[in-house]
């Protein structure tokens, strides 16, 4: 059994893949497994990965998998999870990179702590600028209950730091069915995933370890493109609400889930200029329907306590639903 499996999906990232692969070589060990998943790239990425798989095989265990059709990041990660054999697992996106020696430190930390998963800080790279982003928890290098890190509802907490690649995960989570993503989600795939981890895993820790470099502002990144795929955030947060509503502590946890959902809707509505006109209209329609589906008591409390600018946008959507119902 490999000590660590690193799952790396790639899609049309020929410009950045060499940096990603070079960083894997600088982290390689014979007991590490690199799973390179090509999500049916249409540029030069497949050729780069073929060469890299051969090149890396002398320093680590390598598995190169190519999808016959594009399925999106969640599906590509699931392919990697299905193939992974490691005692521990982590992720890396195909346009990001790692500091030399980071993976060995990550494995040493989770082994020492003995918990289900660990979360790490990361460095955001925008052009030449570098910004450190920290897990929003002050308690570090100590294992504790993941459920305790979901609340409070009115603050940024660990479930808002939803980057799957910012951490490592014990294989027992995979065996329990907690590491797979919702198949086919094109965006916000980390949101239901991180909520599930925090509701159902038994222990986690936050470690002060910097080593993941997250590339922002890439023109081809889905977060930069205002097309219909971004509307998958609605499906992702509907899943968060639905699953959290079934939790024994739903009355405590739902206000947090609803508040986060509302904040994301307001964020997208405030940035309508990036959307194609037809998609912007679909965004408003789907957001109004989402507000109707939310637990209304929790929604009312959220709108009362949210800042005026965002709550006014959401109240207009809520009135739109009420008006449409009355007209019908």
Image: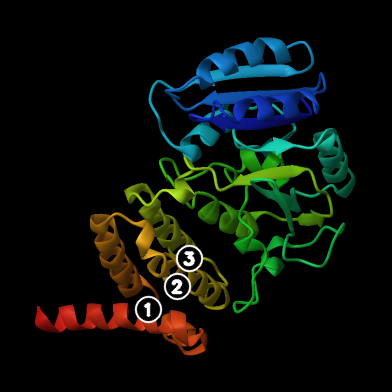
Say how many tags the image has: 3
Q: Picture coordinates of residue 325 (x, y %)?
A: 16, 79
Instruction: Return the residue at label 2.
Output: 262
* Residue that appears at 37% across and 52% down: 226
Residue 225 showing in the rendered view: yes
Mark 1, secondary structure of its residue: helix
Q: Which residue is mark 3?
A: 246
Residue behind mark 1:
314
Please report whichever mark, 2 or 3, sits nearer to the chain's N-terminal start: 3
Q: In the depicted view, which residue is nearer to us: 137 or 13?
A: 13
The answer to whether 283 appears left or right of 67 in the picture is: left
Indicate which label's residue lies in the foreground, 3 or 1.
1
Q: Residue furthest left?
A: 328
- Above or below, 43 against 303 in this view is above
Q: Is residue 193 above or below residue 138?
A: above
Quadrant of the snapshot with the C terminus? bottom left
């Amino acid at each position: 059994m490999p000590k660590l499996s690193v799952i790396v999906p790639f899609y049309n990232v020929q410009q950045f893949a060499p940096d990603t692969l070079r960083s894997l070589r600088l982290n390689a060990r014979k007991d590490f497994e690199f799973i390179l998943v090509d999500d049916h790239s249409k540029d030069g990425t497949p050729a780069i990965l073929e060469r890299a798989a051969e090149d890396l095989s002398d320093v680590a265990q390598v598995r190169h998998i190519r999808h016959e059709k594009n399925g999106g990041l969640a599906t590509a990660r699931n392919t990697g999870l299905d193939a992974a054999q490691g005692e521990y697992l982590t992720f890396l996106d195909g346009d990001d990179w790692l500091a030399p020696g980071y993976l060995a430190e990550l494995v040493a930390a989770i082994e020492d702590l003995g918990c289900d998963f660990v979360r790490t800080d990361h460095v955001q790279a925008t052009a030449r600028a570098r910004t450190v982003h920290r897990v929003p928890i002050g308690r570090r290098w100590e294992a504790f209950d993941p459920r305790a890190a979901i609340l409070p509802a009115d603050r940024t907490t660990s479930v808002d730091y939803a980057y799957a690649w910012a951490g490592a995960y014990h294989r027992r989570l995979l065996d329990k069915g907690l590491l797979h993503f919702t198949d086919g989600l094109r965006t916000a795939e980390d949101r239901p995933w991180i909520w599930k981890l925090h509701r159902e895993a038994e222990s986690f820790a936050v470690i002060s370890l910097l080593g993941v470099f997250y590339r922002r502002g890439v023109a081809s990144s889905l977060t930069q493109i205002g097309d219909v795929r971004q509307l998958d955030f609605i499906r992702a947060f509907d899943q968060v609400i639905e699953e959290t509503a079934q939790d024994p502590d739903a009355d405590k946890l739902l206000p947090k889930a609803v508040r986060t959902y509302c904040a994301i809707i307001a964020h997208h509505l405030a940035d309508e200029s990036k959307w194609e006109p037809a998609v912007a209209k679909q965004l408003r329609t789907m957001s109004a329907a989402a507000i109707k589906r939310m637990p209304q008591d929790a929604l009312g409390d959220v709108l009362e306590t949210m800042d005026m600018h965002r709550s006014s946008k959401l109240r207009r959507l809520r009135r739109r639903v009420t008006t449409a119902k009355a007209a019908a």
